[in-house]
Image (spheres, rainbow, N blue to C red):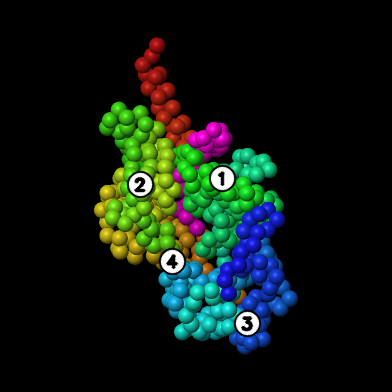
Amino acid sequence: MQSAVTVDAQGFKVRRVHQDAHKLSAYSQLGGDKNSNLVSLNLPKDKSMKDEEDEAEYTVDGPLLRVSPYYFTYMTNCKLRWQNRKLLDLFSTEFRLYTKEQYTEALANGHVTLNGVPATLDSVIRNGDCMCHRVHRHEPPVSSRPIKVVHQDDDLVIIDKPSGIPAHPTGRYRHNSVTLLLQRQLGIKVHPCNRLDRLTSGLMILAKSGKSAQKMVEQMRDREIHKQYIAKVIGEFPLGETEEEKENGIVVEQPLTTIDPRLSFNIVDKENGKPSKTVFKRLNYDGETSLVLCKPLTGRTHQIRVHLQYLGYPIVNDPLYSSPKIWGENLGKNGDFIVEEIQEKLHKIGKTDPATSWLHPDGSGEIMSGKFCDTCKAELYSDPGVNDLELYLHAFKYESSTDKGWGYETELPYWAVEQQTKMMNLALEQAKKIGR
């Protein structure tokens, strides 16, 4: 049962499991009449999995955008790294959505199937297998700041993504993602050409067709696009030692590797990391923090964030890389930390401990609440806090480096404008003291 792929009217690839979601019911995919465990679930037999999912509704609650709980049937084909592994082991190591005990209960109750046959605690996933698991989803709220459309034509939609919203469905987020929000609220079906971290704000390029997406992705792959970000970091970022550094910026070429994909935890790894290169140039310093222009020349996960931390100037409100409670006083400078200890602390974030950062060291945030859903009995999370929703890293300019000659940019974020205004006011005050 291979993952067959076709294309839709816009030329986007559509996996077989997504096609099935539009046509088939959760009842049929979870074994139907052959699975006696489904009786207690009271599954609708005449409603597709997509119809069930689309019953979710959005509500704006002050700074938060909420989506109502809904039923969702995960369907996925076996990935290469999953082959010949027990399902329980796979769930507990690859997915962070539920506890191992909850996955154990789902398997024991026949709520997970392999190729339409109820799985057990001893089930092993093989090449070509299709795994299904129906859940009552509770998505975390995201920022209610609007998605601004910077430019739109027949091929592309260019947006200014707010911080705190993932680019596409991933992990615990589905409807609360840029692509589904644009589709549900504006009727625009698009494919992201570049993917910003959930917490990073700024320019996203989205294609309206498979052909347009391929052209843009090829430009990015061939490094024909210059990207510029702005970040607010801890301390007085250096101007550089040589005249070249002072003019063009400080170059960081430290290889990066992902330690834990569930946490998106990345570090500098000089032996096994992938080549990574970023240029940094200080824009100003206000006596405590610096605004820094960041130009990533490669596209590794968390590249700017990890390179800044390695230099000793992490982003001021980075919950992964700037929290003294996680990293200690040196905040991970020069890679001076024990990976296993950091990983253990990070696994508690969002579960028993709220996210913290240098800027907000004691901010309340999302943790397990001790309250449970009346429908599915799953433990619920508290609302996200300030460290869960914003990062002072903004992609403000993308432009072609070839004769294609295009470029897009956004307005500077409020936190950058505030710092610029502060510095201007200080300069004016000093000028008044000098006199004519």
Which residue type does callout 2 highlight? Answer: His
Three-letter code, disc 3: Gly
Residue at 41 percent of width and 39 percent of height: 294
| Mark 2 burial class by Cα count in 10 Å: few <14, some 14-19, many 20+ | many
Q: CA distance from mark 2 to mark 1?
A: 26 Å
- Name which residue lies at 43% across and 63% down: 262
Q: Sequence order check: which comes first, mark 1 or mark 3?
A: 3
Q: Which residue is depicted at the point 33% across and 44% down?
A: 253
Image side of residue 398 versus residue 351, left or right? right
Q: What residue would you read off at disc 2?
A: 307
Q: Secondary structure at mark 4?
A: loop
Q: Which residue is mark 3?
A: 31
Quarter of the image that includes the N terminus: bottom right
Q: Earlier in the sequence, mark 3 or mark 2?
A: 3
Task: Say whether residue 84 is left or right of residue 146.
Answer: left
Disc 4 designates what residue? Answer: 351
